[in-house]
Image (cartoon, grey):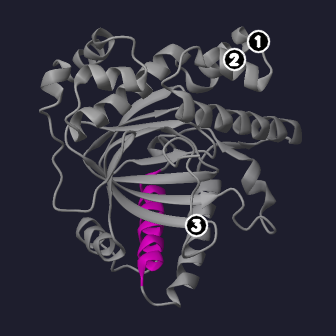
Amino acid sequence: MAENEHSIIQYPKINHIKFYIVSIHYRYPHLHNAFELNLILQGSLRMKISEEVFVAHAGDLILVNANEVHELTAENANAVLLSMQISVNFCKEYFPIWSHTVFHHHFVRPDLNEAQEKRLKSLLCHAAVAYWSSESNQNYRCLALSCLVLEQLKLCLPQREMNYTESVSRQKNTMRLNRILSFIEQHYAERNILSKLAAQENVTLTYMSHFFHDNFHISFRDYLNIYRFEKAMYLLTTTNRSILDICIEVGFNDYKTFNQLCRKKYNCSAKECRKMTLQFSNNRIISNALTIQYMFSDKESIDYLANQYSLDDDS
């Protein structure tokens, strides 16, 4: 399965924990088996998490529960955020409740007083710097600070614990969502995809339609059109192929549908969209049909964070 839709997170330094800074323009709807705490460092980010949609600004903290579908879109210029991803299996032997925890709110600022917010941000930033450090003994510091971040989340934020039945049900639901996203990735240009999905899952067409809408909070048809549109836009801006050929390849019946989507999103025609370019610095860009973002290196991350937050105080 591609990393675009269901992210299979790699933990190259510390098992079950990952920190990174990213300059992001767009991140397609995806989910992963990890909690994610994001600190917006620069710009504004339109976030759709499950059925909730809001705009986060610099200084905001955003929490995403494990296996929640979320989509990120920068408002105007690219947004920069610090992200901490913690697997549901983190310290499972000691804190089994962690994998069953569901936090109620994604936008966490209203749940924190000024001192709590300041401490959480400080712990997050110091843990991140320890994670990026080249000194091996900093791994212990990162692990300790990460536990303190979790302690702050558990102490300060409203939450609930799933019971066994709900936990098993959510796991099965997530597995089905993964299969659906994988199927769309492989067959998005074909006809009658929803019927084929229903047959694969051994459910009725009506059930599959409702299941998709209940989890992605968008109709399957609209989701598929958006998916095809992003694929088409990538080809439009990275190749010289004709617009009609691109439309046919991604599954649009005609040029008209693609052109309408271009006008809806960018207020211009597909031909005019071809002339558009995304402005990035001279950085390494991770760019494909569904994700446009730049991942900072460890050194760049430390330098950037040092310029944004005071890291002198020991946490």
Q: Tell me if mark 3 has few (under 14), some (14-19) or many (20+) residues whose alpha carbon lies within 10 angstroms of its own.
A: many
Evaluate whether residue 133 shows in this view: yes
Q: Secondary structure at mark 1?
A: loop
The three-letter code of the residue at mark 3 reads Ile
Residue named by callout 1: 204
Residue named by callout 3: 17
Q: Is residue 20 left or right of residue 92?
A: left
How far across and how far down the image is residue 101, in percent? 71, 48
Picture layout, residue 21 above or below residue 106: below
Q: Within the image, what quadrant is residue 241 found in?
A: top left
Which segment is the magenta one?
Answer: 113-133
Q: Is residue 172 left or right of residue 65?
A: right
Residue named by callout 2: 208
How far across and how far down the image is residue 34, in percent? 61, 53
Q: Which of labels 3 and 2 is toward the front?
A: 2
Q: Residue at x 31, y 77 (%)?
A: 299
Picture layout, residue 16 above or below residue 207: below
Q: Is residue 186 left or right of residue 28?
A: right
The three-letter code of the residue at mark 2 reads Met
Q: Residue at x 26, y 65 (%)?
A: 308
How far across and how far down the image is residue 20, in percent? 42, 63
How far across and how far down the image is residue 223, in percent? 48, 22
Lower sequence index among marks 3 and 2: 3
